[in-house]
Amino acid sequence: MEIQKLIQKLNNTHNINEKANLIGDAILTYRKNVAPFTAYISDYIFNSGLVKEDVDKLITQINKRVVDSLVHIYPKIDSLDFKLDYSDKDVLIKARQEFNKKYLIEKKWQSKPYLLPNNFYGFINFIPKYPFAFFNENGTVEYENKELEVSQKIYNNDIVLNSSKFFINKNLNTLFSIVTTLKFSPITSQSNNSSNFKKTINNSELYDEAEYKRALDICTYLIPKAKAEDSINVMRYDGTGVEHKNQVFYSDKHKQIFGERAKVPHFHFQSTVENLLYLKKSKKDDNDNSFVTAGCNAIDCDHLIAYLKNLQETSKENLGEDDFGMPFYYAKKFDLQLSVNTNSIIKTFISSSLENNAENLEFVQQFYKELNLIRSKDDGYINDNNNSFNSGNNNSENANSNQPTSFSTNSATKNFDELIGCLKMLKLTHKELEKSENLETIKKLVKIELVVAHEAMQSMFTIEKNINPQQNKDKGGK
């Protein structure tokens, strides 16, 4: 259905159920390009003068129309049945045996459509998750900080580095995962995947953008009943690619927070409303019933930093009720500090970069100085009393240059200071990546980006460092 005809029909009816059917039918129809179709629907729903009660009813009815149409294809489209008895050894062994590890390598950030209750994603981000040895060989259930595997292989002509970690919320008996994928796709026929794989992986020529297209993404998943094929993407980090154009804005505040465009790097936080409006049929084929949630809105580092600073200054009484699909509303509401181990980040970079090379040392020293500026207390970032890196100019004028308006560090809670500093590290890393032409330097910068982005994702996904799930029972489980 052409967008002009759809809008005309919507304007010609005042019946909410009929409007919902029209929009629902449009969502269920193949669309080659999600833009501007989704933007028009979003604009109609939220900016056509409908009162809030009618908007809420309309979204509920659209959701019902779409679910009723797809539930026979995707019976779990609105299911909240995620639990598996992880204390039962036999159940756990069977779950491991049947687990489809292929999703750990393929980029399946949303393999099936899910239309789940309001505020679901913010809550799932917020509940505490503990390291879980899902593939422990002896079959016992232990809470330990163990990485599942780091695979390096040639996959569909791409060189893929993949790391996966599993976590559990014991109170909900639910499995989660963070999957990091760094992929190099050959651009020309001369870009050959070497048979000597280790030599290829260690070769800085991989970072030559004239020869290889590099893609980095970090995805977090909820895995219902430990079935990989049913994985629900909760959040995604895009470290490469193109600027993302946002299309769904359900309030002026929402638009202000996310912005119309998200620069690289950026984060995608799944949202109940966006999952519905971005839903899209994959192929123009009546016999093909593949639907995908095409990306949802993205938020870049600048917009996320501004939102976190504003939220940190907002009193609990003025929080409102909208979490925008993100966990930060709950962190503020329940006084949870999102911790990031920045000392570990800096030490990882320094230890991997100090070589007997004058050019490299100069780069490391300058980058290290800028990292210290980010860590400055005057820049809205908690000063680490155990910090062993004290060189560099830390005066407030330099620390705040080219940054959003600074905020007072005397507020009662510092929920997001460390995360804000981490996001600034990502900005700095990408600034250096954009201007660097030295392949060895680019390789080092990609390594530090992996560490920094993974730390940020763990913080946002509420990964607990301790191994006792009872110690933080008040943060999510019953």
Image (tube, rainbow, N blue to C red):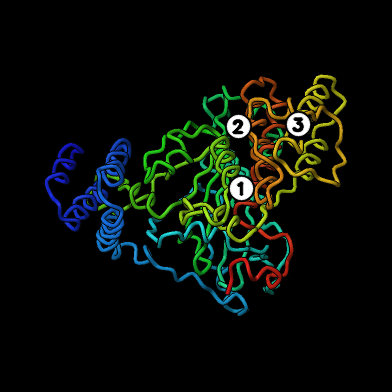
- Image mark for residue 153: none
Residue ID for mark 1: 312
Residue ID for mark 2: 404
Between discs 2 and 3, the one toward the N terminus: 3
The residue mark sitting in front, 2 or 3, is 2
Bin the neighbour count of mark 3 within 10 Å (Cα to Cα): few under 14, some 14-19, many 20 and up: many
In the image, 328 versus 460, the foreground residue is 328
Seen at 85% across and 29% down, the residue is: 355
Seen at 64% across and 43% down, the residue is: 453
In the image, 421 versus 414, the foreground residue is 414
Query: Mark 3: which secondary structure?
Result: helix
Residue 188 visible in the snapshot: yes
Q: How many numbered tags mark residues here? A: 3
Task: Look at the numbered discs 3 and 1 and tell me whether their residues touch, using CB distance below 8 Å.
Answer: no
Residue ID for mark 3: 373
Query: Mark 1: which secondary structure?
Result: helix
**At label 3, which amino acid type do we have?**
Leu
